[in-house]
Image (spheres, grey):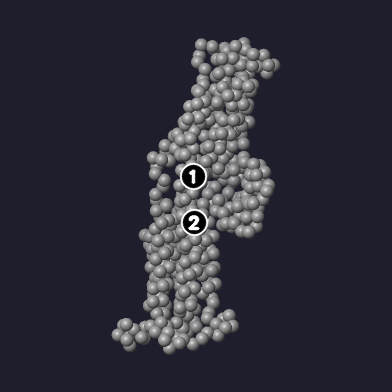
Amino acid sequence: MISRRTCLLAAAAGALALSSVEGFAPQPNVKSVTKLNNDIAPTGFDSFRDLKDITNLPDGEEQRKYRRTVYTHDDWKKHRSQDRFFYYLAAIFSSGVYKNLFREVSLVTFIATMVVVYNGITHGYTDLDGVKHSGLIEFLPKLALPLNVFTVTSPSLGLLLVFRTNSSYKRWDEARKNWGMNINHTRDLVRMANTFYDTTSATPGKRADDLNHVALCTWAFVRAMKRHLSPEEEDETEFRAELYEKLPAQQAEKIIAAAHRPNRALQDLSSAINDLPMHFLRKNEVHSAVTIFEDNLGSSERLLTSPVPLFYSRHLARFLAIWLLLLPLGMYDAFSSSWNHTALIPSVFVISTMLFGIEEIGTQLEEPFTVLPMQAFCDKIYNWCMEIMSWSPGDNGRPMKPVKPEHVYFTDGEINEYTNGGY
């Protein structure tokens, strides 16, 4: 009789637990997905809208390459859709964030199930016919904690989670701003090189070759920076192929062989700028963009090599794990109105998913570069640089005015430097 009742109660509670967590069961690690956030299909909203296309979203680290969102106007319209909550809720069991929490959420849900089963066995339960039975092993203590324990500690946990996510977002935002500065100043650099180029003693072919070299060196730096900030197994092969495709072979080999590839690329860019025929004051202005590139690189290296202090992250993880693992004990009595307290199980499942999810988001954002669309940035920089370098003074139909006598010094600086004693 004892065995039969025990099994019946355990089976009922276990069925509830299973139904709560089965949506989080890891899916096959399939890479061939469509309409996701990546450099090929850079949109963010459709990955939630077309649910049939994301049921095989990869787990763990493989997800990060699909989070490289680049929005367009159409994406923003979908993002602001009044039906977005329905789409997001419908896609909840396909969420990559929640899939990463399978083991943690399963453990907390399992503990909640065991608390319900144990307390039913020791302090009584109600069978499926609604008949109440006394406990089978009444001398054992009841597993429960005062809910006040969690009420008192929840503000501290909330502050820890808020600081964690805020600091991680700031890191992501700084990384994105670094790449925004790269985008802005690559355009600025090639625009100044194109405009300041002195065509007095240069043939059209020479001008085109010099400016093309500057544009390629500019792109080579951002591409080397992207490789520098990316995992080797993800980007090394593509990096080498792109350099050999776009750069002269010797220049590509020098960059690839360098211990610090972005520095080598910056050296090539500085040399290319220095070779341009223009006044030294104008060269200094162009070189200022190179200094900004170096600053952006240093800032990004700091983000990559220096995480949020580990003692903070580890304390938060321990605090959150212990808090949630003990939560079923504190909430047990609050569900006395439900059948054998079984409403505790799905409630703990949802709460643990949401709180673990906040910590997971902070952890995923902490290292921002593998979720930034850096390849898309590099491709756009290349296209824009080459387009700007294809323009020439007067090609808009408006003839260029001759240089005024008082400005000759700034267009023919090298000659004047010699004739004026270098002043």
State if disc 1 and disc 2 touch (CB < 8 Å): no
Task: Indicate the position of residue 290 as horizontal and vertical percent values.
Answer: 41, 67
Residue at x 47% of width, y 74% of height? 192
Using the rendered image of the protein, determine whether residue 388 is visible from the camera's viewpoint.
yes
Q: Mark on residue 165?
A: 1
Q: What element carries label 1?
A: helix
Q: Does residue 271 sit above or below 311 in this rendering?
A: below
Between 270 and 84, the residue placed more toward the observer is 84
Q: Which amino acid does label 2 sit on?
A: Arg
> Within 10 Å of the Cα at label 2, are there few (<14), some (14-19), or many (20+) other Cα atoms?
some
**What residue does disc 2 label?**
176
Q: 420 left or right of 199?
A: left
- Disc on the earlier residue, 2 or 1: 1
Q: 271 left or right of 184?
A: left
Q: Which amino acid does label 1 sit on?
A: Thr
Using the rendered image of the protein, determine whether residue 272 is visible from the camera's viewpoint.
no
